[in-house]
Image: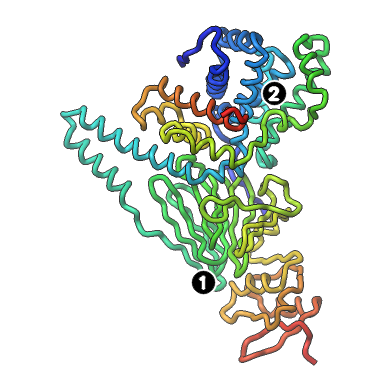
Amino acid sequence: MSLHREGSAPAEDRIEQASSWCARLAEGTLAPEDRKELDAWLASDKENARAFEDVARMWQSFDQTEVSAGLIGMRRDALDRFEQGHAARWQRSAKRRTVAAIAAGIAVMTICAGLWMRSAPESYITGPGDRRVVTLTDGSAISLDAQTRVDVLYSGGRRELQLQHGRAKFSVARDPMRPFSVTAANKVVVATGTQFSVELLAAQVHVILYHGSVDVLAGENRRLQTIGQGPARGLVPGSELIAPLVDDVAQVRAVDLSRSLSWESGQISFNEEPLSEAVERMNRYTDSPLVIADEAAGQVRISGTFFAGDTAAFIEGVTSVFPVGIATFDGRVSFVSTPPR
Amino acid sequence: MSVACPEVELQQSFEQLNRRFRPGLMVFFLRRLGNHAEAEDMIQEVFMRLATMDATRVQSPEAYIFRMAVNLLRDRSRREKVRFTHRAESIAADEAGIDLLDPLRVVAGRESLDDLATALRELPERTRDIFILYRLENVDKRDIAQAFDISLSTLERHLTRAMAHITRCVRGDA
């Protein structure tokens, strides 16, 4: 690595020098003579050491997840131009090689066609009571809960998925060059190599993180504010983010990871959850959905574990423990807040 | 139920760990050791421990790494109190008010997203792209240089210029 440095530079170059040292450190261990040089530079002026610390602090600050998420627009643009550059480079080298001109020409055409063509998304759909695991071309896996639809669109530089409804768990194959994003209504979860689930309910998006890290955005460029008992810096493994569709303030709370995945083995666990959400989830496994008759009933918080699809046991369990009853309106089984006499 | 997953954030290449954490760790250790060789050894130790630990329990790699740095430093000072250099002592006195248990406050200033984004936006497009690809997207320098058809030294100049500009902006110099 060759960097341009002078022995004693004017003060305005100090930050440039500090930046250059910081960039070299970011590449790995310094050679012994460079270490001596860095030590000498740091010792020669107190301001040098301060500049060096400021640059390193700036460098480190880009590791905040909020920061890397908030810059998603600029990151996408940079990656797009990087890919265009790579494609153009193929063309440049093809021009130079006259012998293989035809073969190279075909290769370039194929690559450009691949870059320009946006294929239609692939849809994965489950019906009532179904569950399904699919493996995608890059090795990522999706586990779909019942009544779920995920659209997958892979292009050269992006892996864009859309959760249309239901719930799915994503195990993302690591590929820093192709960001993996899951959009659910107006929220976007961005990941690199990680495991998480996204669930779209009528009024909220739930994101549970199992491994790694994800950024959750409200729309394109806006950060989601988080409140609640979770760590200040947002979603960490073992926590759940609940984002209402109507605004950008999300709640983060700790979650029991294995219970949260019980749906994959056909069991549904609830822990102090509003009946309306519990019913929405249970309804994924039945052809005759349950209904909430009044708002008060929907707000009753329930706990318990039920077999997916066993609606009768769910009704019996809930009505025997919690202050709700059951009634039939227009032939539909409905929860009501006061048990009928 | 097991939720084993081989792809965790921390199982990234040594190169990426270097890129993300070496400058900050260097500042952290240099402040307290005042000696480059020893700081290098400590950083090596941090990365080695990272390679052998159970990464699934890590919640925030950044916080974890600097916590580990604090522990290493504490172990070392217990063992080798004598060898503390004059420089390290004077610096330690300087920052007696700083909580050693919160190294992120020392090394990772909580620059606001808005300031960082503004600084980035002010850069020429090419310079900004190079900084983002290198720092945030972990793309290899050679790949970036090839894609933009520039030499490695030109790329390094872009990178240095970006770093200097962003630093000046968040410092309030610009």
Badge 1, how many Cα within 10 Å: few under 14, some, many 20+? some
Kindly identify the residue that appears in the image at 28 percent across and 34 percent down. A90
Query: Vertical placement of A151 versus B25: above or below?
Result: below
Query: Vertical placement of A235 versus A274: above or below?
Result: above
Kindly identify the residue that appears in the image at 48 percent across and 26 percent down. B159
Where on the picture, by quarter, is residue A94?
Answer: top left
Q: Amino acid at mark 1?
A: Gly
Query: Vertical placement of B110 versus B45: above or below?
Result: below
Q: Position of residue A53 (x, y in %)?
A: 65, 23
Where on the picture, by quarter, is residue A166?
Answer: bottom right
SS for callout 2 = helix
Q: Using residue A331 as the reference point, say whether residue A321 is left or right of it.
A: right
Kindly identify the residue that appears in the image at 53 percent across and 23 percent down. A23
Q: Amino acid at mark 2?
A: Phe
Q: Position of residue A38 (x, y in %)?
A: 60, 12
Give me the chain letter of mark 2: B
Number of numbered labels in the structure image: 2
Q: Quadrant of the C terminus of chain A?
A: bottom right
Q: Is residue A341 visible?
A: yes
Q: Which mark is residue A127?
A: 1
Q: Which residue is the site of mark 2?
A: B28
Q: Using residue A295 as the reference point, say whether residue A9 is left or right of it.
A: left
Q: Position of residue A321 (x, y in %)?
A: 81, 76
SS for callout 1 = loop
Badge 2, how many Cα within 10 Å: few under 14, some, many 20+? many
Q: Position of residue A22 (x, y in %)?
A: 57, 22
Give me the chain letter of mark 1: A
Observer-nearest of A37 and A144: A37
Observer-nearest of B96 and A24: B96
Kindly identify the residue that appears in the image at 71 percent across and 54 percent down. A227
